[in-house]
Amino acid sequence: MALPETFSAIIKQITNIKLAVVILSIYDGQYQALIEDQITGQAFPIRISEGVLLCYADQSIPLFIEESLWLRQSVPYMGDQAQGVAMPLNTLNVEMLKQALQKSIDEEKYELAKLLKEEIDRRQK
């Protein structure tokens, strides 16, 4: 068994804890998450990658996302008209935003450049 599976099995054997992973927000392009005991409400920060891995390894551990974050992060489905992968700006770190800004200027996509510049300025304040 992998570490997350082993960890989950040990916890279930020695406690009556009921775990869930909760994605709360985004800060500087990184999701902020907690692992929470749903019985006591006790929660501890966890890297989202490890939280998702734990939920995958033990499918009895649910993965939740705050509704307001879900609505803010969702992007419209474009079907056959999609020209790439839609990604919310706040999931990109500042360096990635700067690279995307330069590319949008080079390609003369000025509306996108404006949005990227506004996001960079908002984070630097």
Image (tube, rainbow, N blue to C red):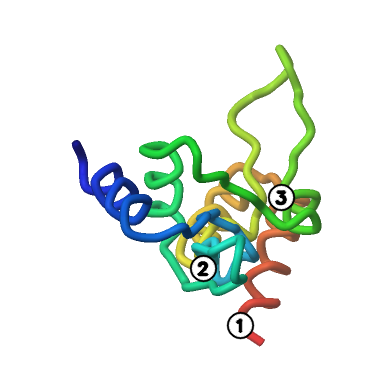
Q: Residue furthest bottom?
A: 125
Q: Amino acid at mark 3?
A: Gln
Q: Of 86 and 118, which appears nearest the observer?
A: 86
Mark 2 and mark 1 lie on one chain; the one further toward the N terminus is 2
Q: Of 102 and 75, which appears nearest the observer?
A: 75
In the picture, the disc for residue 26 is: none
Using a 10 Å C-alpha cutoff, classify the residue at mark 1 as few (fewer than 14 neighbours), some (14 to 19) or many (20 or more): few
Q: Of 30 and 68, which appears nearest the observer?
A: 68
User: Which residue in the protein does label 3 denote?
Assistant: 73
Quarter of the rendering containing residue 117? bottom right
Q: Amino acid at mark 2?
A: Val
**Which residue is found at the position 64% from the left and 64% from the top?**
24
Q: Left or right: 125 with respect to 7?
A: right
Using a 10 Å C-alpha cutoff, classify the residue at mark 2 as few (fewer than 14 neighbours), some (14 to 19) or many (20 or more): some
In the picture, the disc for residue 94 is: 2
Using a 10 Å C-alpha cutoff, classify the residue at mark 3 as few (fewer than 14 neighbours), some (14 to 19) or many (20 or more): some
**Which residue is found at the position 72% from the left and 57% from the top?**
66
**Which residue is found at the position 65% from the left and 37% from the top?**
86
Q: Amino acid at mark 1?
A: Gln
Q: Secondary structure at mark 1?
A: helix
Q: From mark 2 to mark 1, how far is it between C-alphas?
A: 9 Å
Q: Secondary structure at mark 3?
A: helix
In the picture, the disc for residue 124 is: 1
Answer yes or no: do the residues labelled 2 and 1 have beta carbons within 8 Å? yes
Q: Quick one: quadrant of the C terminus?
A: bottom right
At which x and y percent is residue 79? 73, 16
At which x and y percent is residue 47? 41, 62
**Which residue is found at the position 54% from the left and 49% from the top?**
103
Mark 3 and mark 1 lie on one chain; the one further toward the N terminus is 3
